[in-house]
Amino acid sequence: MSSTVADEGLPPGDDGWVPPFPDALDLVVEAEAMLAVFAAHRYVRIDALHREALADAATHGYLLTDVIERSVRLELAAALSITESAAGLLVMHADALVHRYPGVLDSLEGARMSARHATELVDLVDTVEPDLRGQVLEQAIGLAEAHAFGTFRRKLRILVDSVRAATLAERHEQALQQRRVAVTPAEDGMAWFMLFGPAVEVHAIHGRLTAIAKVLTARDDETRTLDQVRADVCGDLLIDGTTDGTPADARGVRATVVVTVPALTLLGDDDGQATVEGLGPIPLARARELCGSAEGWMRVLTHPETGMVLSVGRERYRPPPELRRLVRWRAERCMAPGCGIPAARCEIDHTVAWEHGGTTELSNLAPLCKGHHTIKHHGRWRVHQIADSGGALEWTSPTGRHYRVDPERKVPTFTPSSSEGSMAPF
């Protein structure tokens, strides 16, 4: 519990009100806010230094701009004891914040976002075509001011992808021409094997390797780590072409990738967006191909207006596969504050424990990574699902602070309407 001025021996006001006294965490938060303010001023001064150097060079008729830019980076790096590369990033971000995104600089100066939020915002918004940035910037600032860094970065990428969706198919086709395999030598007789290809296929390859490796590492006589087994399985598949050398229970493992497509989009009746869990948008033509034929792809069709998923599970202690998929699909990530671990790698937690009367239903289930699952049960945190929120969790810390975590997608609740036999969204 936070201390008060009364704890320090100071009297309350005439009306009995005691002004709050900051506790240890409040002081840390205050220091973080000061860092944001100083970061904003640093960027303003770096930009002024940069502009002054360019103006001085022009006054003396020195037109080798690249040389001046390098000189500024060198002097800044020497003064701050950083690399020239780091100094170059400071100059680039300063120019963007002062001249292209003054609203971001104002938010940083007001300590409404951190310097890390600000630089990530600049880097991602700069990838958007100049004529489309206006559709992103205001929302991006709102996301930065509202969310922890990991959640902000994920949501901003989704926002940027949605704005650029119109050109995704064309950009994907151009990028597809660059697919290749490369080998880079490393030390101690090792080398890196790298595949650059369509994200869906690469994600599926990694997923299958991981699934086979998990079967093998679960064996009592296995001493290799998951990474080591995954690498060995990859070599076996590519060199031998079969899994004959692996135990029988691991040979039938296939890749599973979740593709979400609005129903009308799948039918070609609108221009909605198809996404792959953990990856982001994919071209609609590729989504229709996957949803129409390939085995091993879980198809999640959503209502074009409500987003309602047309499948729910059965009630029992262990959630059935359909319900586990729905819980993970709704959240997409671990439902702890700021955590970015994909839901596919998380455990399904009963928010109200089964032994305490909790039920196995969507309104009482959420994915938590192993670390946060342990903290929930043994770290003196309290967690509950917020009623009528579509799956949001509220975490209450040991110091009494509250943190809300919303899922990536909401599954609406339906209740009977006044018309007999009909259903209406609640």
Image: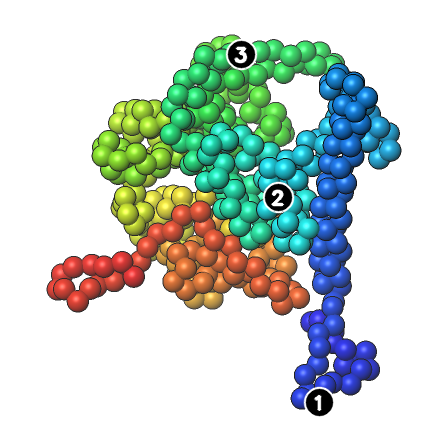
Q: Amino acid at mark 3?
A: Val
309 left or right, relative to 84: left
Q: Position of residue 346 (x, y in %)?
A: 51, 44
Q: Quadrant of the N terminus?
A: bottom right
Q: CA distance from mark 3 to mark 2?
A: 42 Å
Q: Nearer the viewer, mark 3 or mark 2?
A: 2
Tag 3's secondary structure? strand
Front one among 152 and 332: 152
Q: Nearer the viewer, mark 2 or mark 1?
A: 2
Residue that numbered label 2 is attached to: 102
Against 201, residue 366 (above or below) is below
Q: Amino acid at mark 2?
A: Pro
Residue that numbered label 3 is attached to: 181
Front one among 227 and 106: 106
Residue that numbered label 1 is attached to: 14
Q: Position of residue 284 (x, y in %)?
A: 33, 28
Q: Position of residue 115 (x, y in %)?
A: 68, 44
Earlier-in-chain disc, 3 versus 2: 2
